[in-house]
């Protein structure tokens, strides 16, 4: 708006014309239409041909048997439009390149049903990278076409479930395969978009995702305030009530209660909250180091392990990392020996339920599908 | 009637006009209006000019001034930038008369000026914020636009005004535009609080802190400023600071502004309670804040049951004011008060953990066991509310023989 005024610093006659043009431009702007996609395949034909010719297909998009060829052939039934950064001069609004909401929904189902939860594709880090990118492209198409409503919500809900699951399954992986910060950025984006979409109309799975958002953002005043302002019906649902209880325990700094409540969470909820559990356990050790600080007193390691919901050995390791003295079966708490900064490395992943790939693949399906 | 906590209003329009002028204003022609503005500009009469551009002034109801394209006429009589300013203002009166607040907002601009025009800037930026608000509401009711868009744009405009004021190093202190800074900051605070982007307040606070004018602004402006800074401090859990700012705001807020005083109290009370100072019944009655009565009683008595009930009963009020979460922090204080009672009852320095468990169960605290009791006690010890240690083997809390429950104001 301010540029209008800068223009009109010229002579009087000019100014009048500028003003008129500015007024007309205002009116024109309002009539610009929103792009509507016409591409009925998961990947636009143009992109398919281009990527095939430039040998830029992903392994999962190639016709079986041609992967080792000099120029692998594209499988039109499995190719998916990739994410491409918007750039000057690049027209991302061509209708033939955009997929309408119905196709986007089919694409998401394909990515989840046929790729993410399938055990044929290994390793899962590669699956993650492919699905992550293609889902991002789906969301991009949504944004360009200004899609809102049930279709948008469905896409976002699946995206959120996928990203949450990935954050747990790939926790601790090398940075080149999985960057938790990037995953987090996208997850937050999807969540805030989803929560914004929930404001209009009724949505079947809203309670579930409000709860997941609160758990993922444990400790955030904004997240809690948002939930408190939800309509009574949603706030009183079991999922949200449980999430609020966990949140309250966190606010009151009662890790014993928090870890107990966490046992009642279902798998996807655990995925959402898991990154907060290691700091929570550290807090328990910190509080007990201060509260039980005495040279002569001892605390049974087994009991501590139970409070932490860890095996004895792992509990002892955790103590060691934070400067808590363990001798055999006994823990001696001392506020002076506890250190907030961990010495040595005890990664969050060590505290996860150990699962082999087989178990992971079984869980993937139910977790990411969740709401069918 | 619940107030909008973001409406701390202290306007600065002292109207020059008497009743006669008001009547006249409703009938003057466009030419007469423009002549008056021109005279005011030539006489550097900032106050009169600001009234000519303010929506609080009766001239805005004059249909002869409500024009959709007054540019040409304005250009004939006035020099830039006033021609555009006045034209924009008149377009705005037209839009408002048609209840089109979105258009009204768009017609609004702020300009560079010298210090004598500060009252104009005050009036214009105040109207800008109010229009942005109305435009938002209108858009929301039509289901269009994203929440906060209009207000964010208004904030950007105000920021550019602010930068002009803050960077005014040329004029002497009396003529400096820096006098406009606090007013603008208060307007910006109101917007940031409304759109929930409190982190944007930080650079503004820094600007005022480093300014040598900070204690020279009018009391009214400082009261508003400290109110918002106090609320921000609360949000950042800096309760000692929050108490300082909000107390200043409350004390210096004029006696006649009951509404504003009540608003400040809504935030001052929880902070004071966290620091161990409970309000009197008289105070709560005087300012119609009886919602806090049960909370106060519960906390003092260590009555967790009553506290939970009180929080649930007035939930809507507390949540809307944004103090529900802070009041939940009072739970820790309540635990401390309850346990202190146990200590006084048993009259020993080696307290069985079971006693605390019994006390909690009496308060109908659900599914609590000895482990949780230990955790709560450990937390209180960590925070400095209890001096002592827990012996798990003896299942006892051993407290210091001297002052095991230090006064709340000395802790945190």
Image: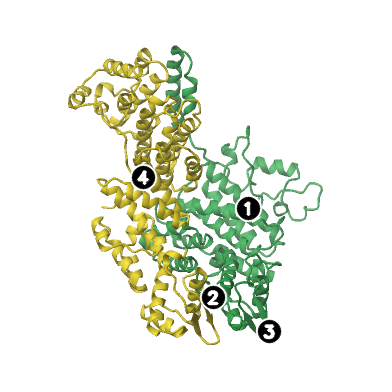
Secondary-structure class at tag 1: helix
Asked whether A98 or B281 is in front, the reply is B281
Residue at image location 42% in from the left, 33% down from the top:
B179
The hue used for chain A is green
Counting from the top left corner in percent of width and height, residue A214 is at: 49, 61
Q: Earlier in the sequence, mark 2 or mark 3?
A: 2
Judging by colour alone, the chain drawn in yellow in this rendered image is: B
Of tags 2 and 3, the one toward the viewer is: 2
**Residue furthest bottom in the image:** B394
Q: How is the image coloured?
A: by chain
Badge 1, how many Cα within 10 Å: few under 14, some, many 20+? few
> Marks 1 and 2, how far apart in space?
38 Å
Distance from Cα at disc 3 to Cα at disc 4: 61 Å
**Could you tell me which residue is drawn at 46 percent across and 48 percent down?**
B198
**Looking at the picture, do discs 3 and 4 lie on one chain?**
no
Image spot of residue A125 (x, y percent): 69, 59
Specify which label sits upstream in the sequence, 3 or 1.
1
Numbered label attached to residue A182: 1
Q: Residue at x 58, y 48 (%)?
A: A138
Residue on which disc 4 sits:
B223
The mark lying in front, picked from 1 and 2, is: 2
Chain letter of mark 1 equals A
Q: Nearer the viewer, mark 3 or mark 4?
A: 4
User: In the rendered image, which residue does mark 3 sit on?
Assistant: A328
Residue marked by disc 2 = A291
Horizontal side, residue A211 vs residue A358: left or right: left
Q: Secondary structure at mark 4?
A: helix
Q: Gap in Å between the C-alphas at discs 3 and 1?
A: 42 Å
Give the mark count.
Answer: 4
User: Are the residues under badges 1 and 2 in a single subunit?
Assistant: yes
Image height of A7 relative to A178, above or below: above
Q: Give the secondary structure at mark 2.
A: helix
């Amino acid at each position: 708006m301010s540029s209008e005024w800068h223009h009109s610093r010229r002579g009087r006659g000019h100014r009048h014309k500028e003003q008129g043009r500015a007024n007309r431009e205002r009116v024109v702007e309002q009539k610009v239409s929103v792009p509507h996609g016409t591409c009925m395949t998961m990947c636009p034909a143009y992109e398919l041909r281009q990527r095939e010719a430039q040998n830029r297909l992903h392994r999962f998009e190639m016709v079986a048997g041609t992967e080792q060829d000099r120029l692998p052939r594209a499988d039109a039934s499995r190719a998916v439009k990739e994410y491409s950064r918007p750039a000057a001069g690049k027209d991302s609004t061509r209708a033939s390149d955009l997929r309408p909401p119905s196709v986007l929904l089919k694409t998401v189902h394909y990515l989840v049903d046929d790729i993410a939860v399938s055990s044929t594709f290994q390793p899962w880090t590669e699956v993650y990278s492919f699905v992550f990118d293609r889902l991002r492209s789906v969301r991009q198409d949504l944004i360009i076409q200004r899609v809102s409503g049930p279709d948008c919500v469905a896409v976002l809900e699946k995206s959120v479930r996928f990203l949450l699951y990935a954050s747990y399954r790939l926790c601790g992986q090398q940075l080149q395969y999985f960057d938790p910060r990037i995953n987090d950025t996208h997850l937050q984006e999807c969540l805030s978009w989803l929560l914004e979409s929930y404001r209009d109309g009724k949505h079947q799975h809203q309670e579930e995702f409000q709860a997941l958002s609160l758990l993922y953002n444990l400790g955030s005043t904004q997240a809690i305030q948002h939930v408190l302002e939800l309509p009574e019906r949603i706030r009183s649902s079991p999922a949200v009530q449980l999430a609020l209880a966990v949140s309250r325990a966190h606010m009151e700094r009662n890790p014993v209660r928090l870890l107990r409540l966490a046992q009642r969470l279902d798998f996807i909820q655990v995925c959402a909250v898991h990154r907060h559990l290691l700091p929570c356990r550290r807090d328990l050790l910190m509080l007990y180091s201060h509260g039980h600080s005495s040279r002569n007193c001892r605390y049974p390691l087994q009991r501590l392990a139970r409070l932490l919901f860890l095996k004895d050995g792992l509990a002892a390791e955790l103590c060691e990392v934070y400067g808590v003295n363990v001798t055999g079966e006994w823990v001696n708490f001392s506020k002076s020996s506890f250190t907030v900064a961990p010495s040595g490395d005890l990664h969050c992943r060590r505290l996860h339920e150990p699962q082999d790939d087989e178990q992971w693949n079984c869980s993937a399906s139910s977790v990411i599908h969740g709401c069918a | 009637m619940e107030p909008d906590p973001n409406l701390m209003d202290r306007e600065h329009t002292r109207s020059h006009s008497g009743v006669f002028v008001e009547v006249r204003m409703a009938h003057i022609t466009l030419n007469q209006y423009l002549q008056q503005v021109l005279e005011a500009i030539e006489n550097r009469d900032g106050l009169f000019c600001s009234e000519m551009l303010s929506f609080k002034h009766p001239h805005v109801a004059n249909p002869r001034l409500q024009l959709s394209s007054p540019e040409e006429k304005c250009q004939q009589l006035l020099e830039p930038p006033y021609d555009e300013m006045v034209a924009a203002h008149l377009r705005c009166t037209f839009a408002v008369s048609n209840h089109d607040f979105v258009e009204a907002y768009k017609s609004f601009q702020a300009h560079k000026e010298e210090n004598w025009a500060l009252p104009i800037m005050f009036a214009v930026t105040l109207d800008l914020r109010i229009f942005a608000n109305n435009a938002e509401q209108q858009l929301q009711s039509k289901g269009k636009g994203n929440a906060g868009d209009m207000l964010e744009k208004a904030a950007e405009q105000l920021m550019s005004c602010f930068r002009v004021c803050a960077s005014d190093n040329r004029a002497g202190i009396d003529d400096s535009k820096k006098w406009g800074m606090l007013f603008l900051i208060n307007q910006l605070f109101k917007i940031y609080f409304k759109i929930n982007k409190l982190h944007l307040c930080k650079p503004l606070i820094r600007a005022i802190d480093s300014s040598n004018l900070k204690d020279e602004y009018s009391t009214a402006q400082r009261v508003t400023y400290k109110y918002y800074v106090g609320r921000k401090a609360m949000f950042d859990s800096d309760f000692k600071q929050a108490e300082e700012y909000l107390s200043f705001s409350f004390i210096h807020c004029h006696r006649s502004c009951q509404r504003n005083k009540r608003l400040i109290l809504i935030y001052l009370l929880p902070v004071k309670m966290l620091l161990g100072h409970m309000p009197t019944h008289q105070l709560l009655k005087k300012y119609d804040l009886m919602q806090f009565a049960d909370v106060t009683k519960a906390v003092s008595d260590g009555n967790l049951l009553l506290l939970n009930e009180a929080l649930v009963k007035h939930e809507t009020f507390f949540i809307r004011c944004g103090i529900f979460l802070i009041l939940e922090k009072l739970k820790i204080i309540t635990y401390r008060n309850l346990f202190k009672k146990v200590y006084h009852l048993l009259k020993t320095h080696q307290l069985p953990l079971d006693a605390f468990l019994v006390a909690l169960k009496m308060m109908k605290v659900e599914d609590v066991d000895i482990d949780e009791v230990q955790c709560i006690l450990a937390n209180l010890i960590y925070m400095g509310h209890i001096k002592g240690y827990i012996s798990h083997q003896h299942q006892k809390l051993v407290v210091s023989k001297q002052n095991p429950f230090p006064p709340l104001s000395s802790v945190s």
